[in-house]
Amino acid sequence: MESSNFFEKVYEVAAQIPYGRVTSYGAIAKYLGAARSARMVGWAMNNAHAMDHIPAHRVVNRIGLLTGKHHFGGTNIMQQLLENEGVRVHNNQVVDFDTHFWDPAEALKG
């Protein structure tokens, strides 16, 4: 799979994450049929911070940790963006992760 094409597919999925919801790198990878490529999804998201139409702050690790926060230019920007959407964060982790979790495999079936 060509990485630039994979990145574009990641961005297409990430762009659909609803306001106030989060998903994980692994959930996006699994949806794209590349379940073992969560790290590659992370690389794609690292490149997405300059793209205003991609809500990169809504992608966290599999237990809700804000592992990509250092790519947002400030130490708490990712947390602030999530909290502005009503997602509580404590100690760099989404509170009630299961409640806020958006599964692309469920939401984008079709």
Image (tube, grey):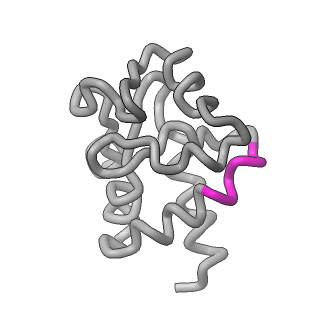
Q: Residue at x 29, y 51 (%)?
A: 62
Magenta stretch encompasses residue 28? no
Q: Which of 49 and 5 is in front in this view?
A: 49
Quadrant for residue 65, please give it: top left
Percent position of residue 100, x then y? 32, 28
Magenta segment main secondary structure: helix
Q: Residue at x 32, y 75 (%)?
A: 36
Percent position of residue 42, x then y? 51, 61
Left or right relative to 103: residue 53:
right
Residue 110 in sight from this viewpoint: no
40 versus 57 height, above or below: below
Q: How many marks?
A: 0
Q: Which residue is drawn at 58% across and 22% down?
A: 80
Q: Which residue is drawn at 40% across and 24% down?
A: 89
Magenta span covers which residues? 46-51
Residue 4 in sight from this viewpoint: yes
29 versus 19 height, above or below: below
Percent position of residue 109, x then y? 31, 49
